[in-house]
Every structure is written in C-alpha cells, then in structure tokens.
Image (tube, helix red, strand yellow):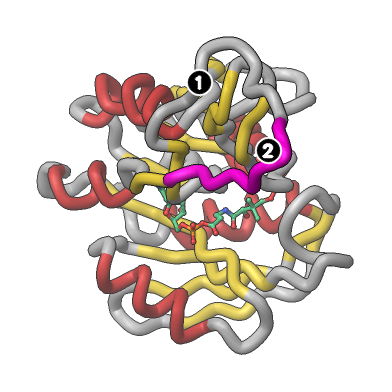
Amino acid sequence: PEASALCGKSVVVTAGPTREKIDGVRFLSNYSSGKMGFAIAANAARRGARVHLVTGPVNLPTPSGVERIDVESAVEMLEAAQPLFGECDLFIGAAAVADYRPEAPVEGKIKKNEAEMEIRLVRNPDILAEFATNRKLGQLAVGFALETAGGIDYARKKLADKKLDLVAFNVYDGRTSGFEVDTNALTLLARDGGVTELPLLPKEEAAARLLDAVESLLPR
Ligand code: PMT
C-alpha cells in the first residue's frame, strides 16, 4: 500500500474524561469512555506515526505501539501534554475535558449536615486551544465538538475560536453516537470550508476516516 503521510510523524492524542476533585472521595466528571481517542491513537500508530496518548481514567487496554500517559484532571492533562507540544506534527483533542473544576477541593471527606451546599467552580485550562494558539507553522490542530443534533454551528464556532485546522462535529444522541457507545457519527469541518459528513460508523472506522482527512492536510 501507499505509504501514509502520517508515517514517521509525531502525534499527540487526548482521550477520555477528566475527573475534578470535590474532596478526597468525590469528583465531577462525564461519560466519556476513551473509545474514540484510543481508536484514533491505535489507527495513527498503524500508519507508522509515533503516538503519545494522554488519557483520563478509562477502562481500555493500551493500543500497540502507543505511548500512554495516564492523568486524572484537566490541569494534569495540560501538564502532561504541554511538554509534547513542541515536537509534535499533529495534536488531536478527543478528550472530554471538564470545563470547570471545584475551586477549593477539600482534603478528606466532606461531612453532610442539614444545610444545603454550594461548590464554587473555576475555569479549567483549554488544552487544545493552548496548543493551537501557540503552535509553530506546519503543526496541525484537530478537535472534536460534541453537540446535540443541530449543533453544527457550535462546532463551526469552535473551529474558528480555537483556530483549528479540522473539527469533528460529533452528534450526541445518547444511543448510537457520542459518549460510551461503540459507534459514532462525525461530520468533519475543515478550516477551508470543506464539509465531510460520515455515516454512523464503528469508532475504529470513524477514526480511520478522520485520519484520512487529516493526511490530506499534511505535507507529503
Ligand atoms: O470517549 P468516548 O466515550 O468514545 O466518547 C467520545 C467523545 C464524545 C468524548 C469524543 O468523540 C468527543 O467528542 N470529544 C470532545 C468532547 C467535547 O464536547 O469537547 P468540547 O466541545 O468541550 O471541546 C472542544 C474541543 O476542545 C475538544 O477537542 C476537546 O478535547 C478540547 N478541549 C475542551 C476543553 C478543555 N478544557 N480542553 C480541551 O482540550
């Protein structure tokens, strides 16, 4: 087969959810399983790329040939990914990073009493935006945008706001596409205006089609 444009390239993929500590035994998180990001990392490695996979807590085996870095929170994800920014040719943000974290996590366990409770949340760093705004010429930035049906304009806004080369608009229907399930429906939006609507596919296949699109953006 024809050599992949990703062969020998350095790729960083984020995957999974993040956990944001409330106290020593509780956290805020989301339903991401890591399947989509792991499928991308596995497929990129098969194309001959050097792949670093920075992942939140998931129950998945490490794809063969992939360097895996486990993290818990968004801040840890940024700290793990940032040292890889300088050398990579391509960054793909497939993680569902929590946008907020509790301002002051409590050590030990919060005890309940009769009163209501409020937890103040502060903004987390945006790992993908951090990469995209500081990258060098030639480094590609690819993101996901999980939205309910009809949310394609939000995805377009993320493409523009985060200055990405490509965004995968990921329909979340709670049933066949999005978090946890084995299939995904992606629409690929390129910076040049190109739109590729993929059918509902197994996440492995969706990952392959996404990387085909990315390859067409890479210099040979
Ligand atoms: O893990 P699975 O169960 O297989 O599910 C896959 C998925 C639905 C999690 C994945 O396909 C997906 O869509 N991931 C992005 C989820 C999302 O809604 O992201 P967002 O719209 O909050 O963020 C947009 C982009 O910025 C994403 O590429 C995200 O990784 C990145 N981001 C967001 C916030 C933040 N603080 N840091 C980031 O890097």
Q: Is mark 2 within 8 Å of ligand 1?
A: yes
**Element type at mark 1:** loop
Cα distance in 3D space between marks 2 and 1: 28 Å
Residue pictured at 78% horizontal, 72% vertical: 173
**Which residue is identified by label 1?**
106
> In this orientation, does residue 5 appear?
no
Percent across and percent down for residue 152 are 52, 83
Q: Main secondary structure of the magenta part?
A: loop
Inspect the magenta stretch and tell me whether residue 114 lies in it. yes
- Residue 121 left/right relative to 17: left
Which quadrant holds residue 216?
A: bottom left
Residue pictured at 61% horizontal, 39% vertical: 28
Residue pictured at 68% horizontal, 23% vertical: 111
The dot on residue 115 is none
Q: Which numbered disc, 2 or 1, marks the residue closer to the eye?
A: 1
Above-or-below relation of 104 to 192: above
| Magenta-colored span | 113-120
Give the residue type at disc 2: Gly
Percent across and percent down for residue 113 are 71, 32
Inspect the magenta stretch and tell me whether residue 217 lies in it. no
The dot on residue 34 is 2
- Say how many tags the image has: 2
**Element type at mark 2:** loop
Circle 2 crowding by C-alpha within 10 Å: few under 14, some 14–19, many from 20? many
- Residue 29 left/right relative to 69: right
Percent across and percent down for residue 215 are 43, 53
Q: In which quarter of the image is the N terminus?
A: top right
Residue pictured at 44% horizontal, 23% vertical: 50
Above-or-below relation of 55 to 43: above
